[in-house]
Image: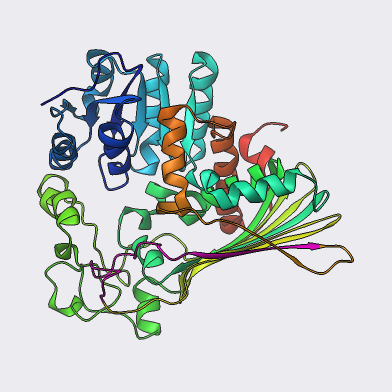
C-alpha cells in the first residue's frame, strides 16, 4: 500500500467514529488526501474504528493506529497530530476540544460546539489561554443558496433588517431518526434546539451580523414518545426495529439489517457498548421536544420568530427576512411528501432518503414594486452542497472568510441553551443572565 506524502502540512486525528465521521475519513483518504493526512482514530468502540480503517485500506492506504478515549492525549503526542476532528456525542465535544487546545493543537468539531453551558465556558477559557483555533462544522453556511442570501442582505437590497421568520420542517423519516438514537436523551444532545437548531441560529446570526441577547421559547413532546404514540394510535409493540416482527410493517421503524453500512457500524458493534441505534420512536425514555417555537432578540434590534417541527409530512424550510426597504423570501422543498414504503430512493427502511431533488425559490419584494424572482442554484450533495464546500475550506484553504469559529459556535449554542432554559422556566431568558456577565 502507498502512504500519503509525509510532507502534507496537517496531520488529523478523528475522535468519535460513527456515521457522520465517515465524511472526514473519506475526505482525508480520498478527495482531500493531498491536503491532509489521517493519522489516528479514537473511540470507545473498536468495531466502529475498524469500519473506518476499512475505508482507509479501501483507499489503498495502511490502516491508522486506534486509541481509546483514556489514551487521547497520548495519541496526540505519539501521532504528532496537528488538528483534532471531534465527532463524538455532543455532550463530550468540550472534553476533546479542550484537551486538543491544551496540547497546543487546533480543533474542528461537529455542531453543536458542545451541549451545555459548562462545556461552552471550558472551550472559551481554553481558547483564550492557548490561542488555538476552534472550527465548528456549520456546513449550512457553505450552502450556495445560503451564501447568496447573505450577500443579498449585505448589499442592502432590503435595507436594515428588522425581523426574520424561520420555519424548519423535518419529515416523518428524518425527524423520527432523532427519536430512536442517542439524541433522544437531552443530557447527551441538548435537545433539537441545541443539536439541530444550532445550524439555523448560526445562519441567522451570520446573515444579519448580530448576536442574540434575549430568548423566549415554548417546546413540548407532542408526537413521539409512548404516551403520544398511544394517544394518536401510532404506537407499535416492540422495543427496537432489528429482529422485531412487530416492527416489520411500521413505517417508523429502522431496519439496520437492510444496510451493510449500518450493520457494520452499529449492529456489529453493539456487543462492545450496548448502543442501539434503532429504538422505537413511540417507546419510553425520550426527554427531548419535537415541536418548538422560539423568539429571539438581537443586539442590532432585529427579532427572530423560529419554529422547528419534527413530524411534518414534507421536508424543507421557509425563511422571510424583512427590512426597511423590502423583504426576501426563500422557500426550500427537499421532499414534497414522505412515502411510508421502501423504494429505490430509500433502500434502508426507516432511514431518511438522499435529498437529490431539492427545489428552491427566492423572491425579492421591494417596497412599492412587484415581486422579483432571484435566480438561485441549489448545490449538489448533502446539505445542499455545503458538505463538499466545507471540506474544501477545512482542508484546502478555500475559506472566503466564513469559517465558523468558537465565538460563532457559542452564539448559536447560547440561543438554544437560552431557549431550553425558557421552556423550563416559562419566562424570557437574557443571554447575559445565562452567562452571568454584563454582555
35 horizontally vs 406: left or right: left
- The x, y position of residue 429, in whole percent, is 67, 49
Where is residue 142 drawn, in percent x and y?
52, 43
Q: Residue 296, percent across and down? A: 69, 52
Q: Is residue 221 left or right of residue 179?
A: right
Q: Residue at x 89, y 66 (%)?
A: 368
Depicted 173 relative to depicted 164: above or below: below
Image quarter of the N terminus:
top left
Residue reaching furthest to the bottom? 233
Q: Which residues are magenta?
A: 342-365
- Up-down relation of residue 379 to residue 92 (above or below): below
How many tags in the picture?
0
Viewport quadrant of the C terminus: top right
* Residue 418 visible within the image: no
- The residue at 77%/68% (across/down) is 371
Specify the principal SS of the magenta part: loop
Picture residue at 31% right of the left edge, 25% below the top: 34
Amino acid at each position: 500500500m502507498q502512504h500519503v506524502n509525509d510532507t502534507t502540512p496537517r496531520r488529523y486525528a478523528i475522535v468519535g467514529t460513527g456515521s457522520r465521521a465517515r465524511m472526514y475519513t473519506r475526505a482525508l483518504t480520498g478527495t482531500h488526501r493531498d491536503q491532509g493526512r489521517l493519522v489516528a482514530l479514537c473511540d470507545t468502540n473498536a468495531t466502529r474504528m475498524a469500519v473506518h480503517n476499512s475505508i482507509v485500506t479501501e483507499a489503498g492506504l495502511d490502516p491508522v493506529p486506534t486509541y481509546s478515549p483514556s489514551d487521547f492525549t497520548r495519541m496526540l503526542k505519539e501521532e504528532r497530530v496537528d488538528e483534532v476532528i471531534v465527532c463524538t456525542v455532543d455532550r463530550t465535544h468540550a472534553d476533546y476540544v479542550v484537551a486538543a487546545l491544551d496540547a497546543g493543537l487546533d480543533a474542528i468539531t461537529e455542531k453543536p460546539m458542545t451541549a451545555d453551558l459548562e462545556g461552552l465556558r471550558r472551550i472559551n477559557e481554553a481558547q483564550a489561554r492557548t490561542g488555538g483555533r476552534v472550527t465548528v462544522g456549520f456546513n449550512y453556511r457553505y450552502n450556495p443558496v445560503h451564501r447568496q442570501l447573505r450577500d443579498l442582505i449585505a448589499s442592502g437590497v432590503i435595507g436594515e433588517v428588522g425581523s426574520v421568520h424561520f420555519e424548519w420542517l423535518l419529515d416523518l423519516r428524518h425527524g423520527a431518526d432523532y427519536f430512536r438514537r442517542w439524541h433522544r436523551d437531552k443530557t447527551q444532545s441538548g435537545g433539537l434546539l441545541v443539536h439541530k437548531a444550532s445550524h439555523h441560529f448560526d445562519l441567522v446570526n451570520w446573515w444579519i451580523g448580530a448576536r442574540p441577547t434575549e430568548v423566549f421559547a415554548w417546546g413540548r413532546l407532542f408526537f413521539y414518545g409512548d404516551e403520544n404514540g398511544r394517544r394518536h394510535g401510532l404506537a407499535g409493540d416492540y422495543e427496537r426495529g432489528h429482529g422485531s416482527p412487530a416492527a416489520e410493517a411500521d413505517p417508523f421503524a429502522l431496519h439496520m439489517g437492510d444496510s451493510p453500512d449500518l450493520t457494520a457500524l452499529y449492529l456489529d458493534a453493539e456487543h462492545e457498548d450496548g448502543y442501539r441505534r434503532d429504538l422505537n420512536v413511540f417507546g419510553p425514555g425520550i426527554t427531548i421536544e419535537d415541536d418548538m417555537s422560539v423568539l429571539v432578540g438581537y443586539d442590532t434590534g432585529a427579532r427572530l420568530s423560529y419554529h422547528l417541527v419534527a413530524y411534518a409530512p414534507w421536508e424543507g424550510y421557509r425563511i422571510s427576512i424583512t427590512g426597511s426597504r423590502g423583504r426576501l423570501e426563500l422557500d426550500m422543498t427537499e421532499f414534497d411528501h414522505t412515502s411510508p414504503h421502501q423504494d429505490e430512493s430509500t433502500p434502508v427502511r426507516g432511514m431518511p432518503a438522499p435529498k437529490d431533488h431539492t427545489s428552491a425559490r427566492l423572491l425579492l419584494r421591494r417596497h412599492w414594486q412587484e415581486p422579483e424572482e432571484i435566480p438561485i442554484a441549489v448545490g449538489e450533495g448533502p446539505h445542499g452542497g455545503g458538505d463538499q464546500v466545507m471540506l474544501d475550506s477545512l482542508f484546502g484553504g478555500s475559506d472566503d472568510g466564513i469559517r465558523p469559529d468558537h465565538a460563532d459556535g457559542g452564539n448559536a449554542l447560547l440561543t438554544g441553551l437560552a431557549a431550553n432554559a425558557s421552556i423550563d422556566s416559562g419566562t424570557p431568558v437574557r443571554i447575559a443572565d445565562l452567562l452571568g456577565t454584563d454582555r
